Image (cartoon, rainbow, N blue to C red):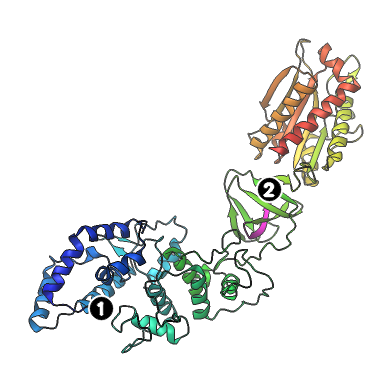
Amino acid sequence: MLRKTFSVYVSLCFLLIFSPLASSWVKAEESNMMAEKSVVAQSQEQNETSEIIEYEGVELEEINMDDPELKEEMEKAEAAGSFNADSYEGQMSTKALTQNSSVSFTDVPASYWAYLNITHLAGKGIISGYESSNGTYYFQPDRQVTRAQAAKMIIEALGYEPAEVSRSTFKDVSSDYWAAGYIERAYQLGIFGGYADGRFGPSDILKRSQMAAVIVTGFGFDYNGYTSTAPVFSDVPKTYWAYEQIQKLHYNGITNGSNYKFMPEDQITRAQFSAFLSRAIDDQFRLTVTGPPVNETVTAFGKVVSSTSLNIRKGPSSSTAIIGSVKAGATVKVTEISGFWAKVNDNGLIGYVHKSYLKLYSNDKRYPLKDRIIVVDAGHGAHDPGASSSGVYEKNIVLNVSKRVGEKLKAAGAKVILSRETDKFLTLEERVKFTQSVYGELFVSVHVNAAGSSAAKGSEVFYDTSNNMNGDESKTLAWEIQKQLVAQADMYDRGIKDNGFYVIKYNQVPAVLVELGFITNSGDRQKLTSSTYLDKYAEAIYQGIKNYYLK
């Protein structure tokens, strides 16, 4: 560091603060270092500038040459011939660090992903921010971390004091360099090493792989009881130099990467380093350790159809702990289904969700209905004949069509359950409970319409949004079936309607009630009593269900 007299120091500060070069430097700092030149390159070109801004938590604007106390102190120092710019800057740095340990940062709101990690470390005085001209502090979470900064943070996190340095181990770290003591201590503890040419590279930017090595070495992490047999991250092979350190970092709950990628060569940001370090220090911030999807069998995919994020639980029960959540509209891998519970993998987070909140898709696009549990409900039965005309009864027509639908669905790989296969009666409540008892994923109730006027004709499909949590999905299903009824059976289009019929209102899966046509209309009745048209009705319902699962 340079030692200068007061007059030289004032000139230097004037040049740094008010020159165009200084303005562009500060702008680069405030814009999160997105200027064309990197911090490393600029610090190499402007050594004087880097000497001032290099301190963690200190910015150029903190040096106020109009401060009376500052002027008085420097005047006394100059008169005594003992003014030391380096030591004074160091005092300012320490002050800034102390202040920042208890402040909030304007660019780290409570909603920020690493907010708790950053405030945790700031509260311990391990990290600090930058003071703006209005007295508030900002953190610059996306700014990179240098090796010198990392050495300071890891040593303070471990509770060590910086070493006394009379002669530095590294030729590019002078004994009065601001982080010399931290670098020396980190070297003594084996946490950091230098380059082959004798340099430490204090301004070099730390990579994620280097961060892993630093934290694992500093905290002495092992495999935490896990057996590491395969790479956790797809971009970190066993031959990679930091493979073991990155594996250990994962198995200690410090990182799960992103989609099982670690990006080891990426430069680490202040927010990322803060998150990793706070997890290493305090177990309450640790992540759930999840294994990589090695030889994972995906039985289906599930799209979250809840209106809000869906909880992922530790076990197949609502009484087990919530270990995470998945956003509405997101798709997860389903590896197992047991009853109403689906075991899912959401980017490495493995847990259980209630399958009624998922629209399940086959893992084979050629067979969209494969393994789907579909309940086909033939309305009425036994002493309840339903609508009738000219000796023709609804209960018989809908049972015939329902059986045909069932055969078509089974041939496509679906697991089909008919609510009734004979002329028997079930109450409306029993039909709903039956669907629940077989863990149904979709419900179609088949009916025939009737009216006082013989002019009424056509098909229509009902769904419910008043109580059925899958009301929107039910609407989509209704529309797909209605389109097919019109197209294949040449039915007059009465559209789809939102109506709270019991069996579609109290089921909590996609549920529709299909009215094939009017038995009281001669044209519709002719179709309803034709074997050819009965098969067309069945094909329409089948194709509608298939098209629903293709969406």
Report which residue position mark 1 lands on. Answer: 1
Comes first in the chain, label 1 or label 2: 1
Find residue 233 and report its horizontal and vertical position in percent. Answer: 61, 65
Q: Residue at x 62, y 61 (%)?
A: 321
For the record, the magenta segment spans 347-355
Q: How many marks?
A: 2
Q: Residue at x 69, y 46 (%)?
A: 356
Q: Is 43 drawn above or below residue 349 in the view shown?
A: below
Residue 353 painted magenta: yes
**Image quarter in which the C terminus is found:** top right
Q: Secondary structure at mark 2?
A: strand
**Image quarter in which the N terminus is found:** bottom left
Report which residue position mark 2 lands on. Answer: 302
Along the line of sight, the residue nearer the viewer: 252 or 7? 7
Q: Is 365 drawn above or below residue 342 in the view shown?
A: above
Disc 1 from disc 2: Cα separation? 60 Å
Rendered image quadrant of residue 34: bottom left
